Amino acid sequence: MIKMERQQMPPQGAPVAPQAPMSDEQDIRDNKLWALLSYLGVLCLIPLLAKKDSKFAQFNAKQGLLMFILWFFVWIPILGWLLGLALFIVWIIAVINVLQGRYWKIPVIGDNAEKLNI
């Protein structure tokens, strides 16, 4: 007799980590470079307009567009410089995640990017 194991469920009331949108591996492999353009300033418009069929490219392009807009506030003394440093760190993390083929929802930016209907 074969004994089937039950999949472990988290205890009731335990917080469940939010899941990023899933895409098939083929989409990620085919569109990694397109997604990378998302974090190169105005080039975020290329995957936004050219790769509407790719969830991975669109996910990153929308976040890249909002980051590009935020870069304009870097010119404000002190507050802008702190924002610039934070954006630079986030940019590095985003690029690393794209190259590894992972979805990474940027805090605050990611939630607003999901609301974009482009």
Image: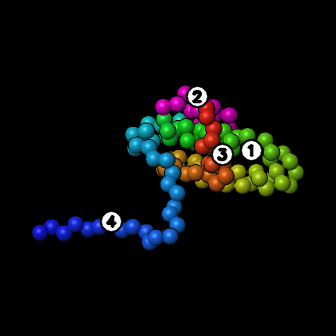
Q: CA distance from mark 3 to mark 4?
A: 34 Å
- Judge whether 41 appears above or below 14 on screen: above
Q: Is residue 92 visible?
A: no
User: Looking at the picture, which amino acid does disc 3 mark?
Assistant: Asn
| Location of residue 33 in the rendering, given as x and y in whole percent from the top left corner | 52, 38
Is residue 109 on the magenta stretch? no
Q: Is residue 9 visible?
A: yes
User: Quick one: label 1 or label 4, which is nearer the N terminus?
Assistant: 4
Q: CA distance from mark 3 to mark 2?
A: 19 Å
Residue at the spot 44% in from the left edge and 72% down from the top edge: 11
- Judge whether 32 appears above or below 82 on screen: above
Q: Secondary structure at mark 2?
A: helix
Q: CA distance from mark 1 to mark 3?
A: 12 Å
Q: Which residue is mark 4?
A: 7
Q: Label 4 neighbourhood size at 10 Å, few (<14), some (14-19), many (20+)?
A: few
Task: Give the number of the disc on residue 70.
Answer: 1
Q: Is residue 19 left or right of residue 81?
A: left
Magenta region: which residues?
35-53
Task: Give the number of the disc on residue 112.
Answer: 3
Residue 49, by quadrant, is top right
| Location of residue 94 in the rendering, given as x and y in whole percent from the top left corner | 59, 49
Q: Secondary structure at mark 3?
A: helix
Q: Which residue is mark 2?
A: 49
Residue at the spot 65% in from the left edge and 45% down from the top edge: 112
Residue 38, by quadrant, is top right
User: Looking at the picture, which amino acid does disc 4 mark?
Assistant: Gln
Of residues 52 and 35, which is closer to you in this image?
52
User: Quick one: label 1 or label 3, which is nearer the N terminus?
Assistant: 1
